[in-house]
Image (tube, helix red, strand yellow):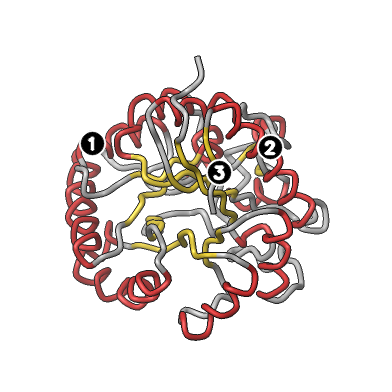
């Protein structure tokens, strides 16, 4: 059965396809303007921020306008787990003011405290683990921090992430159980599939908290071939674990239809870091956009600017 019509979706992309923030060698040698031009040519109307983005709308605004692109989110490297709420209020302030000026929908909160996602010397199997009591305390703090950010005028969206403390479906379930509506969820299909989770079940269980969606696809043959006792998250990225919708193993028609069935409206953002020499960013962006248009239509979404 098709979802009710007139749900609205916006399609964005992350600059990580052009410039990798953790692995500089996996970056295309293009300017910010060329990155935005290619995203616009591919059909996207939003882009998340990344390195090479000036964090100032007086400078960035005219560049975005030239290409018909808006800021549709962007990563914040949070450390609430270890440093607490007050320190992160100070750390997020400049980005928050910038995002408010940009009219962004949210700041993507990624917990980097104790994470091994950026360390090629740490194998996937060595990722940090928290007890339920530790997750409960952390989730309480994240709820309070999320409420403060929303009160300031810029909500967070919490990104479960490979090699971080909230990685697996079970860890996410505990985090969601012990946190409140004050910390919305970013659903990332690729990270959850990589972590061995059931992406549709996660949508079923947590749809009422999802405020942002990353349409990251995975190559399961690459993931299944990893030696997690020896290889790191960044090794997996270099091997091509991630790609754009329509180029990998996930069924995005089913995923997007499930989002529609729960009435999700908002951004669907392609975020697929891989080697630009192997997977040219413009061609991959076009492929991802074409597949998203197909599945949005199948799910009853109207794609808007």
Q: Note whether 185 is above or below 144 in the view shown.
A: above
**126 vs 32: above or below:** above
Bin the neighbour count of mark 1 within 10 Å (Cα to Cα): few under 14, some 14-19, many 20 and up: few
Left or right: where does residue 110 sit relative to residue 271?
left
Residue at the spot 56% in from the left edge and 35% down from the top edge: 194
What residue does disc 3 label? Answer: 303
On the image, the x and y values in percent for residue 137 come to 17, 47
For numbered disc 2, what is the local secondary structure?
helix
Label 2, label 1: how far apart the Cα atoms are: 39 Å
Mark 3 neighbour class, 10 Å CA radius: few under 14, some 14 to 19, many 20 or more: some
Give residue 259's mark.
Answer: none
Tag 2 near tag 1, CB within 8 Å: no
Label 2 neighbour load within 10 Å: few <14, some 14-19, many 20+: some
Q: Judging from the image, what secondary structure is the residue with disc 3 in?
A: strand
Screen quadrant of the C terminus: bottom right
Can you name the residue that lies furthest to the front here?
A: 6
Q: Residue furthest top?
A: 1
Query: What residue do we see at 32% from left, 56% from top?
Result: 156
Query: x, y percentage for residue 272?
Result: 63, 49
Would residue 128 be seen by someone viewing this image from the given angle? no
Q: CA distance from mark 1 to mark 3?
A: 40 Å
Q: Mark 2 — residue?
A: 291
Q: Is residue 66 above or below residue 251?
A: below
* Residue 86 quadrant: bottom left
Asked which quadrant contains residue 98, the reply is: bottom left
Real-space Cα separation, disc 3 to disc 2, in angstroms: 13 Å
Residue drawn 27% across and 60% down? 80
198 in relation to 100, above or below:
above
Q: Nearer the viewer, residue 233 or 198?
A: 198
Question: Mark 1 = which residue?
Answer: 132
- Camera-side residue of 212 and 5: 5
Tag nearer the camera, 2 or 1: 2
């Amino acid at each position: 059965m098709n979802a009710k019509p007139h749900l609205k979706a916006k399609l964005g992309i992350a600059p990580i396809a052009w410039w990798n923030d953790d692995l500089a060698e996996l970056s295309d040698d293009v300017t910010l303007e060329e990155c935005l031009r290619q995203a616009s040519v591919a059909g996207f109307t939003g882009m998340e921020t990344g390195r090479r983005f000036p964090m100032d709308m007086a400078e960035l605004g005219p560049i975005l306008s030239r290409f018909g692109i808006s800021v549709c989110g962007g990563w914040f490297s949070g450390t609430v787990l270890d440093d607490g709420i007050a320190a992160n209020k100070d750390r997020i302030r400049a980005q928050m003011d910038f995002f408010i000026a940009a009219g962004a929908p949210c700041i993507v909160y990624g917990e980097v405290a104790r994470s091994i996602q950026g360390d090629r010397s740490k194998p996937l199997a060595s990722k940090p683990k928290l007890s339920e009591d530790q997750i409960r305390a952390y989730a309480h703090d994240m709820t309070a921090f999320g409420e403060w950010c929303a009160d300031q005028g810029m909500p967070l969206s919490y990104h479960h992430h490979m090699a971080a403390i909230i990685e697996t479906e079970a860890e996410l379930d505990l985090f969601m159980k012990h946190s409140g509506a004050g910390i919305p969820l970013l659903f990332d299909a690729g990270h959850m599939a990589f972590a061995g989770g059931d992406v549709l079940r996660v949508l079923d269980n947590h749809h009422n908290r999802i405020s942002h969606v990353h349409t990251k696809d995975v190559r399961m043959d690459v993931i299944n071939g990893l030696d997690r006792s020896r290889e790191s998250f960044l090794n997996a990225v270099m091997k091509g674990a991630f790609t754009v919708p329509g180029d990998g193993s996930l069924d995005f028609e089913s995923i997007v239809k499930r989002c529609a069935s729960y009435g999700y409206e908002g951004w669907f953002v392609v975020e697929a870091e891989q080697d630009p020499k192997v997977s040219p960013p413009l061609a991959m962006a076009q492929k991802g956009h074409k597949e998203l248009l197909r599945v949005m239509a199948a799910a009853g979404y109207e794609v808007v600017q």
